[in-house]
């Protein structure tokens, strides 16, 4: 059964109430409140804002003698809340409770409103006893302000020759933060026990933020760990989302991989989890994101398009991490089959690791599956005004070095079929080939070798690289909802090392708007500019990115793209400018874009901001260990 908490909605965004209740520092305070309530003979709940049921999900009131529930809104009178028929708050004088719990934060005004209704000797208490210290709050006057809970989880490992690194930068100073933010972290081991807590400051505006497992292990004298890292950024401005790149690296060349941030909001469903190939093991990491256990048989997986759900039979402790080898539930499943994850809002977007029998491994993430969408019959008609409208761009990496594979992945419960095609472009922006999938059924699991399609159609990419765009194609029927996704897998020909990434479609580079598209990070649509973050790998690793200039309709002929290199302190070191043709792409390497002296001045911990005021670019980034190994995932922007 799913947790009855609101985490995120596309209409309202992220919800801070569950974050306030689920913060690691709240747990001890909640235990003290719970003991106080249990010691009372009779407890009444005043629920003016409808938060009591959410409180009960995290801190069950089963052992508290709740005698009555009161509400403020006349419309709520008579509803069932915590198993009681809600009464008007004006009935409080007849209440025989010892304690009245006001289920709200910032409750001073609410307490004043009802104090005269509370019988003498009855104690009034609110959720404000659970508050974090004011010094941890961006806006102490509004506790549930989203900026007070700029949090995220990270997969974090150190041991057996493997290490991890979380990398981002202080982008909040550029958004108006008065001082560089601080970072509060809590590291939980696989059982959910706290390994370490610490707080670090960002010294200068725009500086890199790097959390490296080797450094944390040495700082706190830890042994081997595979853990869940809770990250809380304090003192942010405008943006409550903590974005980062996660790198896994090893003491040898078998471990080099990267993925995206976890997305801070637990979801009902995730999708895009691949089944293992013949020589692989696929492990999905379930990071319990709450201070309550995940019950046995509460989360599970099913093959996409199948109703047969097989459940995790083990209880997962608060903040614990569980390694689900998908073969223990579906031993018969093989790539290119894919799974849907029944998550029940218990955990953030999970990472999965693919271990290859020859010893190499890689990490990637699944995506949030929408359950609030319906088929949109307006999408087929968009072609008249918005050309390709929704499109999903992905690299065709330099064909001499890589094999590139694509797989459509259903990503909403409304997607009973997927009417799609793929358009292939050379890096110079010219269309060179098309592939029609037809109208795929939800249960279809098809992986297509992009290089093989080009070869079958007699196409050689003049530039040696390019990109593909998944688009809607209604020639064979079907319906669409705008939430088109795909998984893209790349194999280095020399080493056999693999990386994969998944993402969804958007409308790109047209001034017309449709249902919040073209998407903008910072303002109302259309989003027609670019700000992407590119972290640098430390020597001997080179860094690359594959930038794509997708356009739903013809846009500016070429981009005006600036690469600005910053050192670890946020000081600007150098700039270079590039021009990318419309519907074209650029495969760029740090080692070629800036000379050795400039790279030396930038040093370790450097990063690049890719900026373009003329168009919206989409990008993929990674690190490269010559022809031995590489990592890759899609980039993020601010």
Image (cartoon, rainbow, N blue to C red):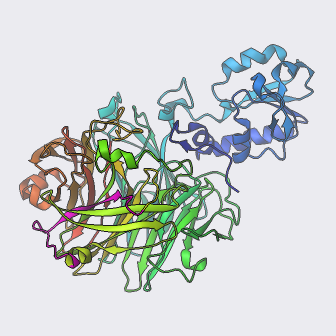
Query: How many marks overall?
Result: 0
Question: In terms of image quadrants, where is residue 74?
Answer: top right
Compared with 88, 354 (above or below) is: below
Is 524 placed left or right of 600 in the picture?
right
Check the picture and name the quadrant holding the N terminus: bottom right
Q: Is residue 104 magenta?
A: no
Q: Position of residue 362 (x, y in %)?
A: 38, 71
Check the picture and name the quadrant holding the C terminus: top left
Q: Nearer the viewer, residue 184 or 73?
A: 73
Q: Position of residue 18 (x, y in %)?
A: 61, 42
Q: Position of residue 466 (x, y in %)?
A: 19, 63
Q: Is residue 458 magenta?
A: yes
Dominant SS of magenta comes to loop
Q: Position of residue 173 (x, y in %)?
A: 32, 34
Specify start and end residues of the magenta stretch as a single range: 456-476
Q: Nearer the viewer, residue 354 or 409?
A: 409
Tell me if residue 214 can be seen: no
Q: Nearer the viewer, residue 436 or 394?
A: 436
Question: In terms of image quadrants, where is residue 609?
Answer: top left
Tell me if residue 610 can be seen: yes
Compared with 286, 292 (above or below) is: above
Q: Nearer the viewer, residue 445 or 115?
A: 445
Is 407 placed left or right of 57 in the picture?
left
Q: Residue at x 21, y 51 (%)?
A: 549
Q: Residue furthest top?
A: 116
Q: Residue at x 40, y 36 (%)?
A: 239
């Amino acid at each position: 059964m799913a947790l009855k908490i609101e985490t995120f909605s596309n209409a309202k965004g992220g919800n801070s109430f569950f974050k306030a209740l689920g913060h690691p520092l709240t747990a001890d305070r909640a235990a003290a409140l719970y003991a106080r309530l249990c010691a009372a003979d009779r407890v009444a709940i005043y629920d003016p804002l409808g938060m009591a049921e959410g409180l009960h999900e995290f801190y069950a009131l089963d052992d508290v003698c709740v005698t009555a529930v009161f509400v403020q809104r006349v419309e709520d009178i008579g509803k069932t809340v915590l198993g009681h028929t809600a009464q008007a708050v004006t009935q409080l004088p007849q209440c025989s409770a010892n304690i009245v719990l006001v289920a709200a934060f910032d409750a001073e005004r609410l307490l004043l409103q009802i104090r005269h209704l509370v019988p003498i000797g009855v104690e009034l208490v609110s959720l404000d006893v659970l508050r974090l210290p004011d010094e941890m709050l961006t806006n102490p006057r509004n506790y549930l302000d989203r900026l007070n809970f700029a949090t995220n989880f990270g997969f974090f490992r150190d041991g057996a020759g493997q290490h991890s690194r979380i990398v981002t930068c202080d982008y909040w100073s550029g958004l108006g933060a008065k001082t560089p933010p601080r970072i509060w972290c809590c590291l939980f081991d696989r059982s959910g026990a706290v390994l370490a807590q610490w707080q670090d400051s960002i010294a200068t505006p725009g500086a890199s933020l790097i959390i490296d497992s080797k450094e944390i292990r040495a700082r706190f004298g830890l042994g081997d760990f595979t853990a869940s890292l809770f990250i809380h950024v304090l003192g942010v401005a405008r943006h409550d989302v903590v974005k980062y790149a996660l790198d896994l690296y090893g003491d040898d060349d078998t471990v080099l991989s990267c993925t995206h941030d976890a997305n801070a909001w637990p979801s009902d469903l995730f999708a895009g989890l691949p089944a293992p190939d013949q020589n692989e093991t696929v492990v999905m990491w379930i990071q319990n994101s709450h201070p309550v256990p995940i019950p046995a048989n509460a989360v599970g997986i099913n093959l996409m398009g199948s109703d047969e759900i097989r459940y995790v039979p083990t209880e997962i402790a608060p903040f614990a991490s569980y390694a689900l080898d998908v073969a223990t539930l579906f031993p018969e499943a093989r790539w290119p089959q894919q799974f849907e994850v029944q998550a029940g809002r218990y955990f953030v977007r999970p990472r999965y690791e693919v271990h290859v029998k020859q010893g190499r491994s890689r990490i990637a993430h699944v995506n949030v599956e929408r359950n609030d969408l319906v088929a949109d019959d307006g999408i087929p008609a968009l072609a008249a005004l918005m050309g390709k409208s929704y499109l999903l761009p992905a690299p065709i990496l330099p064909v001499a070095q890589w094999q590139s594979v694509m797989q459509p992945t259903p990503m909403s419960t409304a997607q009973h079929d997927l009417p799609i095609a793929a358009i292939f472009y050379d890096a110079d922006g010219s269309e060179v080939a098309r592939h029609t999938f037809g109208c795929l059924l939800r249960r279809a699991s098809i992986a297509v070798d992009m290089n093989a399609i080009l070869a079958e159609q007699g196409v050689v990419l003049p530039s040696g690289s390019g990109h593909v765009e998944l688009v809607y194609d209604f020639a064979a029927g079907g319906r669409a909802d705008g939430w088109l996704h795909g998984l893209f897998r790349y194999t280095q020909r020399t080493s056999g090392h693999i990386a994969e990434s998944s993402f969804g479609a958007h409308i790109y580079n047209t001034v017309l708007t449709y249902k919040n598209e073209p998407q903008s990070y910072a303002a109302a649509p259309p989003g027609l500019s670019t700000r992407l973050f590119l972290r640098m790998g430390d020597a001997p690793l080179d860094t690359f990115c594959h930038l794509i200039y997708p356009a739903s309709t013809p846009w500016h002929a070429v981009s005006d793209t600036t690469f600005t290199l910053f050192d670890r302190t946020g000081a600007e070191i150098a700039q270079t400018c590039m021009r990318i043709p419309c519907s074209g792409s650029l495969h760029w390497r740090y080692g070629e874009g800036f000379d050795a002296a400039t790279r030396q001045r930038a040093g370790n911990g450097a990063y690049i901001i890719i900026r373009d005021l003329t168009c919206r670019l989409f990008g993929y980034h990674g690190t490269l260990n010559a022809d031995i190994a590489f990592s890759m995932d899609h980039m993020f922007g601010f």
